[in-house]
Amino acid sequence: MENLREGGFLISKIQKLSSRIFAKLLRDYEAIEINPAQGRVMFPLWNSTKDKISFHELLQMTSLSKATLSHLLDALEKTGHIKRIRPRGDEDKRTVYIKLTEEDKELHDKYIEVSTQMKDIFYKDFTEEDIDEFEVYLKRLLDNLIDFDKERES
């Protein structure tokens, strides 16, 4: 009989519990009205060196489905966190860009504080070497899943 491993199960449990804790920490900062799922969209926007990111780029950065990303963007646009920009001129009219609002850029620092708290919780009693090695393994797992997903789409 094959020895079943717990990696996927553990990752799922970690994701659920960390999302719950992250949501509680965000609520502690009353000025932050975004939830962890929306934060998954906002984080790449905050960390981008670009003024705007295409929907397709954001899709790749978040690994969300088109429907999920569209739903999250609808909510973020409705609450004034982002703007959708349609190209003008010679650009492809089908491309939609996502841009932060000026007001939302101020939330970035608070969100980073909460993210730092989460990092400290995650890596309590880990050495820098432990963290580096662990993250290499996580990236390998993610790459395996991305490769599998691409093969299934082909």
Image (tube, helix red, strand yellow):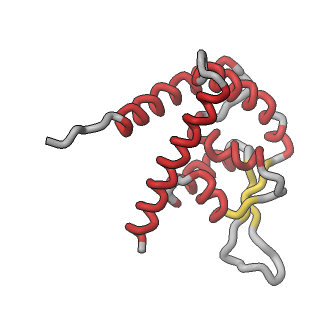
Question: Is residue 36 rendered to the left or right of residue 15?
Answer: right
Q: Nearer the viewer, residue 89 or 47?
A: 47
Residue at the far left in the pictured view: 1
Location of residue 70 with respect to 117 vertically, above or below: below
The residue shown at (72%, 79%) is 92
Question: Is residue 15 rendered to the left or right of residue 126?
Answer: left
Question: Is residue 32 rendered to the left or right of residue 50?
Answer: left
The reply to whether residue 26 is in sight is: no
Which percent across, then down, holds residue 150?
Answer: 46, 66
Location of residue 99 with respect to 125 vertically, above or below: below
> On the rendered image, what quadrant is the C terminus found in?
bottom left
Location of residue 66 with respect to 71 vertically, above or below: below
Q: Nearer the viewer, residue 12 or 140?
A: 140
Corner quadrant of residue 85: bottom right
Which percent across, then down, holds residue 133?
Answer: 58, 36
The residue shown at (66%, 17%) is 28
> On the rendered image, what quadrant is the N terminus found in?
top left
Which percent across, then down, holds residue 25?
Answer: 63, 21
Q: Nearer the viewer, residue 14 or 86?
A: 14
The residue shown at (54%, 54%) is 63
Which percent across, then down, holds residue 14?
Answer: 46, 29
Q: Nearer the viewer, residue 42 or 77?
A: 42
The reply to whether residue 143 is in sight is: yes
The residue shown at (71%, 29%) is 32
Location of residue 152 with respect to 112 vertically, above or below: below
